[in-house]
Amino acid sequence: MIQVQHITKAFAGHTAVSDVSFDVEAGEILGFLGPNGAGKTTTMRVVTGFLPPTHGTVVVGGYDVVTAPLAVKSLIGYLPEHVPLHPEMRVSEYLSFRAALKGVARAKVGRAVERAIEECIIGDVRGRVIGQLSKGYRQRVGLADALVSDPPILILDEPTIGLDPTQIREVRKLIKELGRKRTVVLSSHILPEVEAVCDRVVIISRGRLVGEGTPEELKRQLEGKVGAQAEVRAADFDPAAFESVAGGCSVESEALEDDVHRVVITAGEEAGAVEEEVFLVCVERGWVLRELKKTHVSLEDIFVEIVAREDHADREADEEPDEEPDKEADKEADEEPGEEES
Amino acid sequence: MSARAGSRTMSGAGEAVLRWLRTLWVLFVRELRSIFLTVLAYAVLCLSLFANGGVFLIYVFVFSESHQGINMPPMEMFFGQTIFFYIIMLVGPPLITMRSIAAEWKSGTIEAVLTAPVTEAQLVLSKFMAYWCFFFALWVPTVSYPLLLEWYGNLDWGPVASGYLGILLLGGLLVSLGIFTSALTKHQLLAGLLSFSLGFVLFVVGILAYLNVSAKATPFFEFINMWGHMEEFAQGTVDTRRVVFYLSSIATVLFVTIKAVQLKRVGQ
């Protein structure tokens, strides 16, 4: 349904997206995951035809975004990041305007608006002026706007940002329902959201594609990865003692007090019971084991790790951090930390 | 570029034109309604009524005191033969148009508009049409002045009609300049100041025609002299050259505006 091929988007002074390619199949929900300033919004703007790519092509439903922008735009329902709505209009009035603008036949506008209002549960604010709505309702009006012409493709940029937890759950449920008969691309910087809603995930960091797969695939790649975390008191502490655990693993340690050290051990996939081996090493050396915990690597850890690794590599490559200029710092506030400790 | 989507089949071409016009109409209606929902609209409406009313009162008094040697009918004077007219003309359009596109850049609604099947041309044209209509709405109440004169005496309605045509054309140019500067920035005030400056420069360069700066340049100054043009219109002369000048200038400014929106969108 959507083929994104090697798109690069450069602005004066920095490159927001470089050489990103991915496909979206008809009927799937694709999650577009990345930290703030990774280039998610820019990519979505390129796909919707709002921004032309510097290089590369985007084909939506068989139409090229650059050469047939109107055909592409009539296939897509788009919810922009900050949900820009005309504040002076009433909800139903705005939706009628948008439906007409998107080419819904005059006689069908009323029905289309009713359906969108019903689907997004905004019936109780239909007569209100948009400027006076709460963030949650604005978000849902934005969604209704994206839906109103019943487009086969929905592109939603951070659809749950700024919502309270109940609203987040409602919107996610709504997206899942919408995704049953439509192709949906949604961006998010919150991993559990993507995990909960999407069929497939694309991870983007600093303008580059760094991972792709179903949440299960991504998880399976990492599920084998187990490890242990221990706190050890020993005068003759030597982290190298743990390196042979599980047939070779990575060990990080830091000194907490004089003799007390924290050790984080991450083993390979077929590692087995790492914590038992850690215990045995301590016994053998006569070290005091103050705490021992089995750890699983969550998708979130991987996400953070991939992003951090890329980040690190990038910073070595060029000193200048190229963030998107319009990203506010307050978006950092994660609604859901999504820890997966066991 | 707008017809591209529909031009795949010949039979679809007519339909595509209709669709194009419908989108323009939908945008225009929304824009016009939203103008009338702003406080600024009513403030400008009141101000222009006060200003025009006061000015007209002065003309009538001047006219009644014909011993001062001024022998010009009030309506002719009203259509641009005093500086008051140009003050209203140069201040009004920047004031009403400054938010037209700047506000869309600021709030981001332009992203919603341009990701619907809408071209920049439709956006700019609909803005221009809506603000031009609003501009003319400011002048509609002044029709009561010639009606008043008709009540107390005889009035030649020909020059009145051509006078309003002049207001419409000159106003159209100033409104298009306002839309243009508003497309350049998200700061309304900046857009307003810029379009006021453009209009003011146009006015000043035009009246250089009266100063005989150089014989070579005078025809050029006359060509853009809005005072001179309004004089003709007020006397009942509709010169095709003037009509063509204003309409083609408006078209040029709007074309540049469309290009400006495209360029600015790319650099977003």
Image: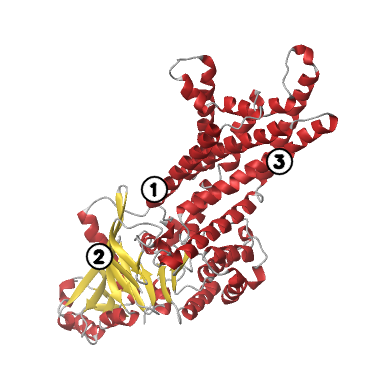
Chain letter of the residue carrying label 3: B
Q: Could you tell me if residue A258 is visible in this image?
A: no
- 3D distance between C-alphas at marks 1 and 3: 37 Å
Q: Up-down: is A273 above or below A298?
A: below
Circles 3 and 2, Cβ within 8 Å, touching? The answer is: no
Residue underneath mark 1: B263
Q: Position of residue A101 (x, y in %)?
A: 53, 62
Q: Label 2 is placed on what type of residue?
A: Arg
For the point 48% across and 78% down, which residue is it?
A178
Percent position of residue B179, x then y = 52, 43
1 or 2: mark nearer the eye: 1
Does residue A214 appear to the left or right of B54 in the view shown? left
**Residue at 64 percent of width and 27 percent of height:** B80
Q: Which residue is mark 3?
A: B140
Labels 1 and 3 positioned on one and the same chain: yes
Sooner in the amino-acid sequence: mark 1 or mark 3: 3
The residues tagged by marks 3 and 2 sit, at their Cα atoms, a distance apart of 67 Å
Q: Is residue A54 shown above or below A292?
A: above
Tell me the residue that label 2 is attached to.
A309
Residue A327 in view, yes or no? yes
Q: Amino acid at mark 1?
A: Leu
